[in-house]
Image: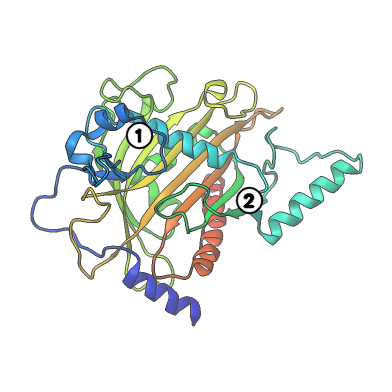
């Protein structure tokens, strides 16, 4: 009953509730940038005046810095790059800030005891980095948010598991909006609203050299809208998201990869119609929710028999007003584990 009533409260309080209006939408789209490392020049190139939601002189005459920027301009490439830095910092952080679930703690303790006892660790297919996944285990952690500002009171969840497919195939699956229902049981649908990179996303995401002439970055960037219907929620949850994906260079990106194997990152953050980080309309048809950070770090793993395996690390940082943080954390832990299992099940079928 507590869970049901809490989710009902989330439906009514999560964020702005809305249905698509009949009038034409605003062309600008904004995302929060309070936790991104952007220079003043970056900010100026990204949006100009339209993205400066709180710019102005205070009593001291100091110009305030906006917490949101428009992603429609040709200069929004620095936003994509800054999001990747945050994404990789979270996904590759193996420090003690992360608290494992009980099951994950037992798995890692058993592994450590075998290693300490001189028996070695032979887990079969497994990446060479710390806390790598093995077998059918799904490792799950949570942590306090170390980035200040909006949403920092809400926890960050991390999960990790092996997928019987190449990293290339996994990133192509999660990037294709027409296929989301094939692995996400809660999805009502997802659509691409706006392509931000001008080159072909299906091919450019695999290139380390080819850059979009508009944004000056490799990979694929777009704005997506989606709806999902989690269990025990009365109304669908609706998201509008900036999505960016690219292939990683282990040395330049500071990510440990398995030899010369391929690796990719996808990063998502909620997008808004208004420069103050709010939706442009409201109604009772669905609940507009916010994702501050959604990350897929996908790394190929070398195998002796040539089988295709990769490891998927998921990061989720969601803002959910109206639901107790503890309950939201538990729901996030379950969802993070199920996401890995659902992707795995898709490639096993």
Q: Which residue is located at x 61 percent, y 28 percent?
A: 257
In the rendered image, residue 184, in percent from the top left (x then y), is placed at: 44, 54
> Which comes sooner in the sequence, label 2 or label 1?
1
Residue 76 lies, with reference to residue 280, above or below; the image says: above
As measured in the structure, the alpha-carbon distance from the residue carrying label 2 to the one carrying label 1 is 26 Å
Residue 74 appears in the figure:
yes
Residue 268 lies, with reference to residue 18, above or below; the image says: above
- Bin the neighbour count of mark 1 within 10 Å (Cα to Cα): few under 14, some 14-19, many 20 and up: many
Q: Which residue is located at x 48 percent, y 46 percent?
A: 147
Residue 170 appears in the figure:
no
Question: Outermost residue toward the top?
Answer: 209
In the rendered image, residue 283, in percent from the top left (x then y), is placed at: 20, 67
Question: Is the image coloured rainbow, by chain, by secondary structure, or in one colour?
Answer: rainbow
Q: How many marks?
A: 2
Q: In front: 323, or 337?
A: 323
Can you tell which mark lies on residue 98? 2
Tell me if 61 is positioned left or right of 312 in this view.
left
Q: Which residue is located at x 13 percent, y 58 percent?
A: 21
Q: Which residue is located at x 52 percent, y 36 percent?
A: 88
In the rendered image, residue 187, in percent from the top left (x then y), is placed at: 38, 57
Question: Outermost residue toward the left?
Answer: 23
**Mark 1 lies on residue:** 79
In terms of secondary structure, where does tag 1 sit?
Answer: helix
Q: In front: 277, or 298?
A: 277
Q: In front: 154, or 196?
A: 154
In terms of secondary structure, where does tag 2 sit?
Answer: loop
In the rendered image, residue 333, in percent from the top left (x then y), is placed at: 56, 59
- Bin the neighbour count of mark 2 within 10 Å (Cα to Cα): few under 14, some 14-19, many 20 and up: some
Q: Quadrant of residue 175?
A: top left
Tell me if 280 is positioned left or right of 287 in this view.
left
């Amino acid at each position: 009953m507590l869970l049901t009533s809490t989710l009902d409260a989330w439906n009514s309080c999560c964020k702005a509730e809305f249905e698509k209006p009949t009038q034409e939408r605003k062309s600008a789209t904004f995302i929060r940038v309070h936790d991104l490392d952007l220079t003043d020049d970056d900010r100026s190139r990204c949006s100009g005046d339209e993205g400066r939601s709180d710019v102005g002189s205070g009593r001291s005459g100091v110009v305030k810095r906006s917490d949101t920027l428009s992603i429609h301009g040709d200069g929004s490439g620095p936003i994509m790059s800054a999001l990747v830095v945050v994404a990789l910092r979270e996904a590759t952080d193996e420090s003690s800030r992360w608290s494992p679930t009980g099951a994950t703690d037992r798995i890692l303790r058993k592994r450590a005891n075998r290693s300490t006892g001189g028996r070695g660790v032979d887990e079969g297919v497994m990446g060479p980095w710390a806390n790598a996944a093995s077998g059918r285990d799904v490792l799950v952690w949570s942590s306090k948010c170390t980035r200040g500002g909006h949403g920092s009171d809400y926890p960050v969840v991390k999960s990790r598991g092996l997928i019987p497919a190449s990293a290339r195939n996994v990133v192509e699956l999660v990037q294709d909006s027409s296929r989301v229902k094939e692995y996400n049981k809660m999805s009502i649908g997802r659509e691409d609203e706006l392509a931000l990179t001008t080159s072909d996303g299906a091919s450019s995401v695999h290139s380390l050299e080819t850059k979009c002439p508009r944004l000056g970055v490799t990979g694929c960037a777009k704005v997506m809208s989606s709806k999902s219907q989690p269990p025990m929620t009365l109304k669908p949850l609706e998201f509008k998201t900036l999505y960016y994906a690219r292939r990683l260079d282990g040395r330049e990106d500071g990510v440990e990869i398995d030899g010369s194997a391929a690796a990719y990152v996808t990063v998502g953050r909620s997008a808004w119609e208004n420069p103050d980080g709010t939706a442009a309309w409201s109604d009772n048809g669905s609940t507009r929710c916010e994702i501050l950070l959604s990350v897929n770090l996908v790394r190929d793993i070398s195998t002796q028999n040539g089988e295709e395996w990769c490891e998927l690390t998921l990061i989720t940082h969601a803002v959910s007003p109206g639901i107790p943080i503890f309950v939201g954390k538990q729901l996030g832990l379950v969802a993070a584990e199920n996401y890995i299992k659902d992707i795995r099940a898709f490639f096993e079928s």
